[in-house]
Image (cartoon, helix red, strand yellow):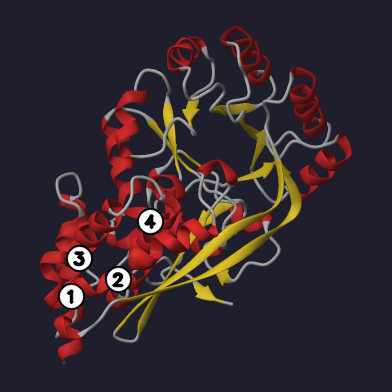
Amino acid sequence: MAKITTRRNFINSAGLLTAAAAFINPADIFARSAKTVVKKVSSKNLTLKWLPFDAQLTHPFTIANFTRTTTPIVLTEITWDGYTGYGEAAMPPYLGENQPSVMEFLKKVDLSQFDSPFRIQDILAYVDSLAINNTAAKAAVDIALHDLAGKIIGQPWWKIWGFNPETAPDTSFTIGLDTEEVVRLKTKEASPYNVIKVKLGRDEATDKMMINTIRSVTDTMICIDANQGWKDKHYALDMIHWLNERNVNMIEQPMSKYQLDETAWLSERSPLPVIADEACQRLTDVQHLKGAYHGINIKLMKCTGMREAREMISLAKALHMKVMIGCMTETSCAISAAAQLAPEAEWADLDGNLLISNDLFEGMKIVNGKITLFDKPGIGVTKI
């Protein structure tokens, strides 16, 4: 009977989440009501563990400035009272983190001072205070903590937050810069998806070759990520007009993140939405981007995880900015965590797990090109 009472108490608390979401962080609600979820919290200990892992890319991945064949990752686990939550730090080179730096940061994290995994707000504020940067390392703790709390409650985070899984968008499938032959092959591999994300930004000839090659194979919707590759606003505007005639639906980070005035000029004239990626790292960036971009791309590895990502979504919507949920090259662990937020986004680029050959988890699935969220607790992953 005690277990039934506990679950009923949670459901009653969860019913308040949607109504209070605009005013109260869900983590605060859990912190206040933790005793109704799990008894004798003070007798439990939170334990953090980690392990380095190299994600192997199925194809070499090339963007405007470099090529790579692997992504360094650090996997995390937080355990409490027989439950285990999984997390992940994925580190492409431009983040400035690597496996040693992440593991050095994680050594500083002392969770033993907290008596409950439901003190999410307090725990993650403490973790964030340990260093100025290390955002992927912080995300590894954040994701594992959310997974743990969701498993204890027995509910997925999309449901805890009150989101509608039916509104989750299609995910794009990414094609990096490459030769015509390889681009044609990758385009055929992308046939199960309804949106193709194309990396541009090297030079005009290469950019147009990429689009023309893809269009020789398919008319599938395209979104563009120039990765700050376009240097001149007039050239960028000409390219956007050219792309607009070829079934493209948006442009991600066309120019340098430091060219805010030039990007504002471009956005004012662009026939397509212009979305900030490298220019948008954390919550404090969002307000400054209003007027320069039409929307923001949120990535857990940039913003320290699920807690801040949700806050960024709320702020962006309050500013009437569009939202995209993106990713690095990640396992299904981090991808499934990001997918919990997908119902609140206009666009999603959650294909990082699809680009690697050695995934260690099963989680969020793509069904007919669409992000599909299941009723599995936490972030909805299991180890393979």
Front-lying residue, 310 or 201? 201
Which callout, 2 or 4, points to the residue nearer the camera? 4
- Proximity of marks 1 and 3: CB atoms separated by less than 8 Å: yes
Classed neighbour count for the residue bearing mark 2: other residues with Cα under 10 Å, few (<14), some (14–19), many (≥20): many
Residue where numbered disc 2 is placed? 149
Q: Quadrant of the C terminus?
A: bottom right
Q: The disc labelled 1 sits on which kind of residue?
A: Asp
Residue where numbered disc 3 is placed? 119
Which callout, 3 or 2, points to the residue nearer the camera? 3
Which callout, 1 or 3, points to the residue nearer the camera? 1
Q: CA distance from mark 1 to mark 2?
A: 13 Å
Front-lying residue, 380 or 179? 179
Where disc 4 sits, the SS reads: helix
- Proximity of marks 2 and 4: CB atoms separated by less than 8 Å: no
Is 18 placed left or right of 326 in the picture? Answer: left
Q: The disc labelled 3 sits on which kind of residue?
A: Arg
Q: Quadrant of the N terminus?
A: bottom left
Circle on res. 115 = 1
Is 373 placed left or right of 46 in the picture? Answer: right
Q: CA distance from mark 3 to mark 2?
A: 9 Å
Q: The disc labelled 4 sits on which kind of residue?
A: Lys
Q: CA distance from mark 2 to mark 4?
A: 17 Å
Using the image, determine if residue 255 lies above or below residue 227.
above
Q: The disc labelled 2 sits on which kind of residue?
A: Ala
Residue where numbered disc 4 is placed? 138
The picture places residue 236, in percent across and down from the top left corner, at 61, 14
Q: Note whether residue 343 is visible.
A: yes
